[in-house]
Image (spheres, grey):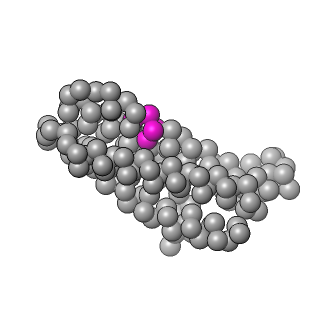
Amino acid sequence: MANTLQFIHSYWAYLVLLIVVLATLNALAGFFSKREYGAKDFRISLFALIVVHIQLLIGLILYFVSPLGLQSITTNGMGVVMKDSTLRLYAVEHPFVMILTVVFITIGYSKHKKKLLSSKKFKTLSIFYTIALLLMLSRIPWGQWF
């Protein structure tokens, strides 16, 4: 089961990264070009929210069934995990930072819906989605991707 979840989590991550980059660039372009916020912009930001939450659910399940997640901490102890950069990445850093990523995307999406002006909608999305994208890029296990 862990191998199947790992496969799904790894390949879904490509879609997540693509959509979050697209949503962030769309928000930044809308903000700087001062265009009107439309249905396309809403769908792009919503789709980013959806794919990120699906990835979070898969990742949380994987964290509890994978030997690199919680089992690594319970087997080796937190001291050993924190001293080993690979174990620390998979058991602590990656999950924590990706949860923060989801939090920023969720907050940005929720806050932008309350804004009435297009410039404020794009500004809110730009700030929160850019922070989320930078966090996401900082803790992707790049060695596994290529």
Q: Residue at x 45, y 54 (%)?
A: 51
**Total marks placed:** 0
64 shown above or below 9 = above
Vertical relation: 119 (above or below) 2: above
**Can you give x and y, in whole percent of width and height, for residue 14 in the image?**
45, 64
Residue 70 located left or right of residue 98: right
| Residue 142 can be seen, yes or no | yes
Residue 16 locus on image (x, y percent)? 44, 58
* 109 sits left or right of 90 in the view: left
Residue bounds of the magenta highlight: 104-108
Is residue 70 or residue 111 the one in the foreground? 111
Q: Is residue 9 above or below residue 96?
A: below
- In the rendered image, residue 44, in percent from the top left (x then y), is placed at 31, 50
Q: Residue at x 22, y 45 (%)?
A: 39
Whole-percent x, y for residue 120 in the image? 25, 29
Front residue (pair 137, 104): 104
Residue lying at 52% horizontally and 54% vertically, measured from the top left? 54
